[in-house]
Amino acid sequence: MRRSLRSYVPLWSYFADRFANRAMRKLVDAAPAVSIETLGENQLGRITGTVVPFHGKLLVSPLAKRACVYWTASISAWGSDAGPTWVLSDSADAVTFTLEQQGHRAVIDPASAQIGVANAHVSRCAGPFDADPEQHALLVAEKLLKRNWWDTQVLVFTEGVIAPGTMISVVGAGVREADPDGAAGGAYRTAGQTRVRLTGSKRFPLWITDQVRVHQRPIERA
């Protein structure tokens, strides 16, 4: 599902979310594919690689308790088998992480990013009285325990994560900097190797997705 980092979108409907996801995939696919090694300064491109923690920093997702660099969690209330449905909360968090591709790396700062991930964990309960410890903790964090639950039949908890080892694509532009680990850990790295750091803004966010088109090879710069 598509999420703005640390934002709450309590009234997004199912169809609005699907259309936003589709628009995001089109934007990502339209960006020129470039390898991390050859992405130039302030060059807009789409890089693809494997997620690695940056300086060991990781989060723990609230529901499945998975180690990750990004999580998103939503709580929906169903009034009956056929609906209606209300999205009660929609939250997310992320930390800076590294993207690695054939020994070359990019540091990704997701503070201003549009992030799309597949929903990997879905759970349900009849209400706060029926919630497991993880569901109850999320209800507390979202200040939902004192809500009127009279018309609620089922609560649906949905979580998506970007975990270490996941292959993702990032669209954005960045700057080159020295890679302090560039000469360590393997013959494919060389002294003086650089890495690229991608940082978005509210006006020009990064676009991050785990829906990767792996058959497309990066376009190398001349």
Image: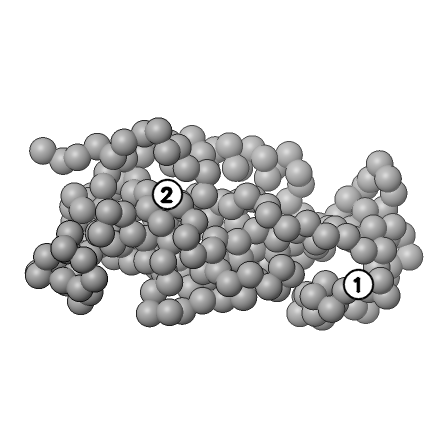
Residue 27 visible in rendering = no
How many numbered marks are there?
2
Q: CA distance from mark 1 to mark 2?
A: 35 Å
* Residue 46 x %, y %: 30, 40
Q: Residue at the location (40% across, 60% down)? A: 111
Instruction: State yes or no: discs 1 and 2 in contact (Cβ < 8 Å).
Output: no
- Residue 43 spot, x, y in % from top left: 20, 43
Q: Nearer the viewer, residue 34 or 201?
A: 34
Q: Position of residue 220 (x, y in %)?
A: 17, 35
- Could you say which disc has been placed on residue 131 in the image? 1
* Residue occupied by mark 2: 169
Q: Label 1 sits on what residue type?
A: Ala
**Left or right placement of residue 162 versus residue 40 in this view:** right
Left or right, 55 with reference to 93: left
Dot 2 amino acid type: Ser
Image-based side of 114 in relation to 191, left or right: right
Q: Secondary structure at mark 1?
A: loop
**Residue drawn at 14 percent across, 62 percent down:** 183
